[in-house]
Image: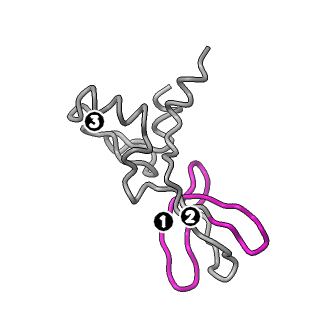
Amino acid sequence: MFTRTCLVCHSVANEGAKLGPPLDGSAHRGTEGLLRAIVTPSAAVESGYRLLLVETVVGEHLDGFLASQDEHAIVLRRPQREDLRVERGSIASLAFDTVSVMPLFAYLTSLR
């Protein structure tokens, strides 16, 4: 379950993805800190891990983590997909989401 649920975004000992923060050293946060991070993941989302919401001029809605940008385009990093280059001329709006994308709590509450 950890591999399917957590390592698709996080890494431990250099294994897994690099979309979310590495989980190495999580034990140093203590039980209360870990529970807070799991139950209210949006309370302390680090700036590099906020989801970027993009609307294109043709009304398409895209999202991903801002991997890079220049004066011509932005590059979105997306879980289990290739990075997506979006030309600036095709962007109508950009906004960072304030809600964590960590799905663990949603997953746990779906178990019956």
45 left or right, relative to 95:
left
72 left or right, relative to 2:
right
Tell me the distance, in whole angstroms, between the alpha carbons under discs 3 and 1.
24 Å
Percent from the top left, x then y, of residue 35? 35, 28
Does the magenta-highlighted stretch encompass residue 63?
A: yes
Residue drawn at point x = 50 percent, y = 25 percent: 1
Q: Which residues are magenta?
A: 54-82
Element assignment for label 3:
helix
Q: Amino acid at mark 1?
A: Ala
Q: Amino acid at mark 3?
A: Ser
4 left or right, relative to 31:
right
Residue 67 circle label: 1
Cβ–Cβ under 8 Å for marks 3 and 1: no
Cβ–Cβ under 8 Å for marks 1 and 2: yes
Residue at the disc numbered 2 = 76
Tell me the crowding category of disc 3: few under 14, some 14 to 19, or many 20 or more residues within 10 angstroms, Cα based: few
Percent from the top left, x then y, of residue 28? 20, 34
Q: Quadrant of residue 94?
A: bottom right
47 left or right, relative to 59:
left
Residue drawn at point x = 36 percent, y = 47 percent: 44
Cβ–Cβ under 8 Å for marks 3 and 2: no
Residue 47, compared with residue 6, is above or below; it is below
